[in-house]
Image: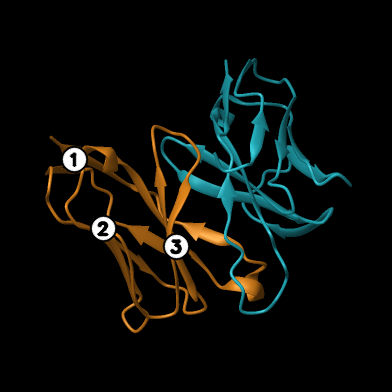
Amino acid sequence: DSGVTQTPKHLITATGQRVTLRCSPRSGDLSVYWYQQSLDQGLQFLIQYYNGEERAKGNILERFSAQQFPDLHSELNLSSLELGDSALYFCASSVATGVQGYQETQYFGPGTRLLVL
Amino acid sequence: QKEVEQDPGPLSVPEGAIVSLNCTYSNSAFQYFMWYRQYSRKGPELLMYTYSSGNKEDGRFTAQVDKSSKYISLFIRDSQPSDSATYLCAMSAGFANAGKSTFGDGTTLTVKP
């Protein structure tokens, strides 16, 4: 158990709908990362938040958005869903001290499996 | 061209074999090199972490980094059926890139009893 929790575990919805995925980082971790993993594309970085602020952005669609709340949990919002959005969505957290030379080792949650029909 | 290319596999070996998993990369800024293990589409689990070039050993696992060749490897000695999983390499430029990691697509390993 990494200490990172994600809800829900599974989500089935229809095209055009909107869903919210939730992540609680490990105690003490300030940084949250979101990843998408589909069968044909591997693990793709979406976005990172550090202590409530967006820090880095990857291949995140405009239909997707995220935020990190004062209690450090994070939500990933997916809207106008398409069939191709079906994937595993992982959240990871790290201490993120922001100290140069320090690699922020990431701990992954169990993921949310999204199926868009 | 992807920044990180990983030998696609799949790889099937008998129990007790030595396994070699490999990745190449193109970004010279990468300084941190990680290997993750992922069981059955569950969350990736950090196995090994190496900074810059060199070797690092942890039990049956050895990670090697050759920055001059932009090539990293993970060796598994005396492989066990419980090692059957997908292995992902990951790399990061560290603080300079907000700690963001770029992952390979993974190599699926099956160790047969």
* A70 relative to A92 in the view: left or right: right
Q: x, y (%) of residue A92? A: 62, 47
Image mark count? 3
To which residue does mark 3 refer? B34
Instruction: Report the amino acid beneath label 3.
Output: Met
Callout 2 amino acid: Arg
Residue B1 makes an appearance in the image? no
Q: Nearer the viewer, mark 1 or mark 2?
A: 2
Instruction: Please tell me which residue lies in front, B81 or A40.
Output: B81
Vertically, is A111 above or below B101? above
Quadrant position of the C terminus of chain B in the picture: top left
In the rendered image, the residue lying farthest to the front is B59
| Callout 3 crowding tier (Cα within 10 Å): few <14, some 14–19, many ≥20 | many
The residue that label 2 is drawn on is B60
Q: Position of residue A43 (x, y in %)?
A: 49, 46
Q: Which mark is residue B111?
A: 1
Label 2 environment density (alpha carbons within 10 Å; few <14, some 14–19, many ≥20): few
Give the chain coloured cyan.
Answer: A
Which chain letter matches label 3? Answer: B
What's the chain of the residue with tag 1?
Answer: B
Placement of the N terminus of chain B among the 4 image quadrants: bottom left
